[in-house]
Image: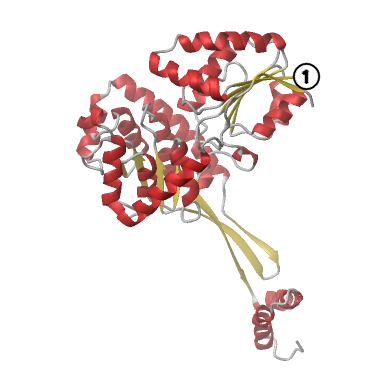
């Protein structure tokens, strides 16, 4: 395979990972032992928040009422699309019972987890869409307790420290409790049941590298949705792609954060050159804060990769296994059939990643750092357990028991074998075992 980097990233998604682990593991240890007081201390130190942690219902109502009706309509639109897509996912799952042999019946139950912890980013941007993505999906799955944690700061003090759009989205989606806690302390509060006495069975939601590392360290003690670190986006473009739109899409995703990779794979020298030229101009036209973020992301993590064929493009894309994958090329059905590793796929020029980020329906909480090689994004399945069960008659034991005993002895597990023996002797005393 022949590929050429027109632009190569200066950093990768593992940069600074050792320092991140050390910092996060130390904080989690302090939070586990210091509990609520430690969480309040980190909120004050890192976010400047010293007020209530559990957001009162009156504050939520005030935040909702402070928003224009048009804003609430947009949030309802997004909620309905996400809810409807999640409902279709839930309806695709089913319980069943099957008779495997005479007298041997096995089945599957679908049981929601009891408590879901939903982390909602809220630092630089007001991620109202993320609130909907996690909470609405948990509700569709049938989760009993849905608790959210999101950063608070003094500029939003009159609405519990949280942007009113986030509070509105959480309320609309059906969140039970909202914690004004961000970062590692927010994730820890969900995991340890701080302020609620409901430790999460699973923690979901995107976040920066500290949030992602906290979820990774806690995995096993709690479930997690995906390893959702800094946003990644890849665009595949053929020679007929519009460089202006490709460049705009790359810049649009670079805005997420200074460590958000954006990658272009193209089969066209002309498209590569035009995009490389256009991206800095589009970044310069952004408002200052967004422009500074996007510029650093493009400088440090941006790549443009030239390949000779669409088959090579697929191979490179699958190796990266990007969170978002946007194909702007002919014969979209071919790409759909041949691409394998991605968090979510966006087909055609019309289907920009931002639509999925905000309101089109499929969940935007997706795997990063190559995890798309083995998992998809957040969905109803993450909030439920598919539990198997079985029962059998004594006649079935007559068939199954001797086989289980022989395999147990083959493996050297005599006590296992004797659990079969004792039943065979009891149920069939006249036979020789």
The residue under the point 58% across, 37% down is: 369
Q: Quadrant of the C terminus?
A: bottom right
Judging by the rendered image, the residue that carries numbered circle 1 is 308
Label 1 residue SS:
loop
Could you classify mark 1 by the number of other residues whose Cα lies within 10 Å: few (under 14), some (14-19), or many (20 or more)? some
> In the rendered image, is residue 122 in sight?
yes
Residue 297 vertical position relative to residue 167 in the rendered view, above or below: above
Nearer the observer, 5 or 181: 5
Whether residue 181 sits left or right of residue 232 in the image: it is: left
Instruction: Tell me what residue is drawn at x 46 percent, y 46 percent.
Output: 22
- Front-lying residue, 375 or 89: 375
**In the image, residue 278 lies at what x, y percent?**
57, 8
Q: Position of residue 168 (x, y in %)?
A: 31, 31
x%, y% of residue 69?
A: 29, 21
Quarter of the image containing the N terminus? top right
Q: Where's residue 349, x and y in %?
A: 60, 16
Q: Quadrant of residue 172?
A: top left
- What is the quadrant of residue 175 in the picture? top left
Q: For this rendering, which residue is in front, 124 or 94?
A: 124
Is 62 positioned to the left or the right of 383 in the image?
Answer: left
Say which quarter of the image contains residue 250: top right
User: Can you say whether 425 is above or below 165 in the image?
Assistant: below
The residue lying at 57 percent from left, 29 percent from top is 11
């Amino acid at each position: 395979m022949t590929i050429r980097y027109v632009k190569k990233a200066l950093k990768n998604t593992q940069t600074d990972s050792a320092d991140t682990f050390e910092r996060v593991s130390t904080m989690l240890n302090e939070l586990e032992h210091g509990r609520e007081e430690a969480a309040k201390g980190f909120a004050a130190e890192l976010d400047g928040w010293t007020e209530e942690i559990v957001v009162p219902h009156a504050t939520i109502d005030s935040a909702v009422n402070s928003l224009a009706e048009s804003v609430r309509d947009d949030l309802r639109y997004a909620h309905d699309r996400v809810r409807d897509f999640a409902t279709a996912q839930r309806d695709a799952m089913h319980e069943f019972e099957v008779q495997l042999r005479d007298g041997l019946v096995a089945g599957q139950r679908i049981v929601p987890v009891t408590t879901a912890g939903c982390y909602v980013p809220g630092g630089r941007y007001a991620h109202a869409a993320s609130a909907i993505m996690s909470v609405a999906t948990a509700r569709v799955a049938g989760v009993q307790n849905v608790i959210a944690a999101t950063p608070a700061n003094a500029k939003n003090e009159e609405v519990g420290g949280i942007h009113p759009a986030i509070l509105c989205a959480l309320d609309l989606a059906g969140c039970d409790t909202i914690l004004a806690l961000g970062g590692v302390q927010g994730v820890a509060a969900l995991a340890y049941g701080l302020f609620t006495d409901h430790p999460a069975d699973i923690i979901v939601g995107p976040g920066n590298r500290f949030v992602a590392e906290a979820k990774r360290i806690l995995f096993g003690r709690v479930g997690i949705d995906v390893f959702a670190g800094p946003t990644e986006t890849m665009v595949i473009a053929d020679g007929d792609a519009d460089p202006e739109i490709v460049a705009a899409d790359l810049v649009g995703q670079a805005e997420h954060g200074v460590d958000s990779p954006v990658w272009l794979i193209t089969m066209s020298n002309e498209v590569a050159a035009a995009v490389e030229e256009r991206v800095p101009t589009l970044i310069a036209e952004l408002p200052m804060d967004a422009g500074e973020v996007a510029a650093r992301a493009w400088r440090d993590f941006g790549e443009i990769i030239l390949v000779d064929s669409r088959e090579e493009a697929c191979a490179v894309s699958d190796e990266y296994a990007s969170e978002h994958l946007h194909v702007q090329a002919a014969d979209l059905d071919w790409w759909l059939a041949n691409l394998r590793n991605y968090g979510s796929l966006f087909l055609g020029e019309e289907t920009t990643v931002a639509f999925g980020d905000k309101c089109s329906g499929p969940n935007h909480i997706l795997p990063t750092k190559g995890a798309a090689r083995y998992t998809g994004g957040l969905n109803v399945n993450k909030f439920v357990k598919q539990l198997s069960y079985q029962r059998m008659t004594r006649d079935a034991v007559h068939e199954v028991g001797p086989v289980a005993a022989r395999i147990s002895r083959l493996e050297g597990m005599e006590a296992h074998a004797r659990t079969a023996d004792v039943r065979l002797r009891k149920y069939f005393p006249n036979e020789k075992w």
